[in-house]
């Protein structure tokens, strides 16, 4: 996992509202939750929620799917597992990236 992606994910989770949204979605599992229910449960205005969901989505921490007129948001557990792996052993994740960068620079 690229260092820039790790940073982007942690920046997204570094805001209290986004962390609260993330935690709520974690409790709902793979099924996720419609945006309207997220707004209701957390008492967040629609525009504000949309901004924070977009930020979490840009960081690839959440995904969405449309069912009719409803958009469900869910956690991307594969990405979360990679972040947990990084937290357990940051040298392993970043050393692979460094090797790739060194090989690329050596080829130039």
Image (cartoon, rainbow, N blue to C red):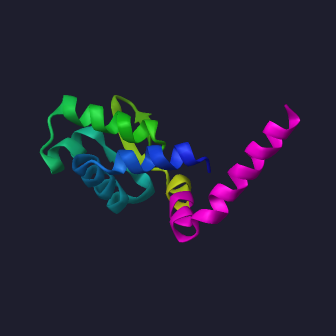
Considering every residue shown, the one lying at the far bottom of the view is 88
Is the magenta region chiefly helix, strand or loop? helix
> Which of 31/1 is in front?
1
Q: Is residue 76 above or below residue 108?
A: below
Q: Is residue 28 left or right of residue 78?
A: left
Where does residue 33 sit, x and y in percent of width and height? 32, 48
* Residue 86: quadrant of the picture: bottom right
Residue 61 in sight here:
no
Judge by depth and name the residue closer to the eye, 55 or 24: 55
Instruction: Let me know if residue 100 is in the magenta part.
Output: yes
Q: Whole-percent x and y of residue 89?
A: 58, 69
Residue at the spot x=76%, y=51% of the render? 99
Q: Position of residue 23 (x, y in %)?
A: 31, 58
Horizontal relation, residue 18 to residue 41: left or right: right
The quarter of the rendered structure image containing the C terminus is top right
Which residue is rendered at x = 69% and y = 58% of the image? Answer: 95
Q: Write the start and end of the magenta stretch as one range.
A: 82-108
Residue at image point 53% right, 44% down: 5
Q: Residue at x 42, y 33 (%)?
A: 66
User: Of 98 and 22, which appears nearest the observer?
Assistant: 98
42 sits to left or right of 75: left
Q: Would residue 56 be seen by someone viewing this image from the given angle?
A: yes
View extreme (right): residue: 107
Residue 49 belongs to the span the image colors magenta:
no
**Nearest to the observer: residue 63 or residue 65:** 63
Residue 36 in picture, x, y percent from top left? 23, 39
């Amino acid at each position: 996992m690229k260092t820039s992606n790790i940073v982007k994910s942690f920046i997204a989770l570094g805001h209290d509202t986004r962390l609260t949204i993330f935690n709520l979605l974690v409790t709902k599992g793979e099924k996720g939750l419609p945006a309207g229910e997220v707004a209701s449960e957390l008492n967040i205005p629609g525009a504000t929620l949309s901004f924070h969901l977009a930020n979490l989505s840009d960081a690839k921490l959440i995904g969405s799917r449309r069912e009719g007129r409803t958009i469900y948001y869910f956690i991307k557990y594969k990405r979360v597992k990679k972040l947990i792996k990084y937290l357990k052993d940051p040298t392993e994740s970043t050393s692979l990236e460094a090797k790739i960068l060194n090989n690329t620079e050596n080829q130039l």
